[in-house]
Image (cartoon, rainbow, N blue to C red):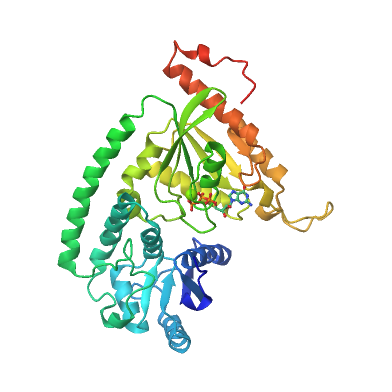
Amino acid sequence: MLEKKATDYEKAVLIGVINKDQNETKVAEYLDELEFLTFTAGGEVIHRFTQRMDIPNPKTLIGSGKMEEVEQYVKQNDIGSVIFDDELSPAQQRNIEKQLRCKIIDRTSLILDIFAQRAQTSYARTQVELAQYEYLLPRLTGLWTHLERQKGGIGMRGPGETEIETDRRIVRDRISLLKKKLTKIDRQMETQRGNRGALVRVALVGYTNVGKSTLMNVVSKSDVFAENKLFATLDTTVRKVVIGNLPFLLSDTVGFIRKLPTQLVESFKSTLDEVREADLLLHVVDISHPNFEEHIASVNKILDEIKSADKKTIMVFNKIDQYKAEIIEEDDLVTERTQAHFTLADWKKTWFNKIGDRALFISALNKENLDDFRKRVYDEVRDIHVTRFPYNNFLYPEHLDQY
Ligand SMILES: Nc1nc2c(ncn2[C@@H]2O[C@H](COP(=O)(O)OP(=O)(O)OP(=O)(O)O)[C@@H](O)[C@H]2O)c(=O)[nH]1
Ligand SMILES: [Mg+2]
């Protein structure tokens, strides 16, 4: 396939708001992520605007002066989309669109757009389409209607090659149809999962792009699509894995993200059931990412939403090959020991203190520490297995040291 030329990318600007909950540094990090999302959706970020505002403007989120600045910039630079990190109310979206006269996209619709592009199976497509329409319905009046000729691109794509429908009545009908379709698929999936027998079920969970699929491929010798873009995986893959002589099921599923749209969490119910019904979670973390602790918090929040926060969990800190701390001199008493200055050894100590042997440090890419990983997973799975099959555990002797 041909590489996308730079000119194929739609020009976009980003807008972030600095307030008491998110300082300038945080907003810069959030916008980094938003830029990565935009790139994944096929956009190129030309400029970023930020504004300090403790109370958001109910009409346009940002203030009227800033709006004028953005308006000028959009006109002069042929900008296709203005992307907000914060969720816009339907009214805000309408007002902003009226003034800027280009596509107005917020974090939620950008994520939905990526999901739509990435959905492969008819099941994933149905789930995404439902989430998109649930998001769109309250926003349909006046949605880009004067941009008829400019339609298409980011924010306008439905699953597959189709464009999303913008007729209210059709959208309503479509929503009820999709819901019926999903209920049917949900039932089928439930039966399928029921047929898998009583094998122990382990689920990989984690923020998007942390290396879940890479780890899945290494451990199960399978071939799940892994890529340095966000949301490479949308469906759930389940593989039977054997460590030592112990078989179990390992699943890889959709990655999480800060402020994952609720519409998606709801419509991806069945995909997430794999996590909900797992006996053990492997929470994969990209320790080389400056924001990894916040990623952990976002993942835990979603686990809580899907009632899986109390499950047995092993924290798998991945990408140790890529981890770099800023080097600080021994006698440097001036530099604050901030997060960026921790060495990997410091982090290990911290996490070992917090959760003891439930923390693991690996590189899925370079296959570092995988024996340790296998042993730990083996031990956990065996414990669950033995409880489940109390009369059958002669198969798994205590002294097994070959994994
Ligand atoms: N340096 C380094 N890169 C890694 C490691 N593991 C995975 N990656 C890279 O990280 C990127 C994302 O990997 P994936 O396996 O697709 O991540 P994922 O968690 O499945 O992502 P989603 O499916 O998008 O949620 C790819 O470019 C991988 O090659 C690692 O241990 N070290
Ligand atoms: Mg993946």
Q: Is residue 48 visible?
A: no
Q: Which quarter of the picture shows residue 144?
A: bottom left
Q: In the displayed image of the protein, which residue is found farthest to the front? A: 1
Q: Is residue 2 left or right of residue 151?
A: right
| Image height of 318 relative to 170, above or below | above
- The quadrant of the image that shows the C terminus is top right
| Image height of 5 relative to 315, above or below | below
Identity of the residue drawn at 36% across and 76% down:
103
Q: Which quarter of the picture shows residue 290?
A: bottom right
Identity of the residue drawn at 51% across and 46% down:
213
Q: Nearer the viewer, residue 363 or 207?
A: 363
Q: Is residue 224 visible?
A: yes
Q: In the displayed image of the protein, which residue is found farthest to the right? A: 331
**Residue 134 horizontal/vertical position (percent):** 26, 59
| Image height of 386 relative to 170, above or below | above
**Residue 323 horizontal/vertical position (percent):** 68, 51
**Residue 152 horizontal/vertical position (percent):** 34, 74
**Residue 304 horizontal/vertical position (percent):** 40, 42
Q: Is residue 153 left or right of residue 283?
A: left
Identity of the residue drawn at 53% across and 42% down:
217
| Image height of 21 relative to 45, above or below | above
> How many numbered badges does the structure rendering display?
0
Q: Nearer the viewer, residue 4 or 133?
A: 4
Q: Nearer the viewer, residue 259 or 228?
A: 228
Identity of the residue drawn at 72% across and 56% down:
336
Q: Nearer the viewer, residue 126 or 273?
A: 126
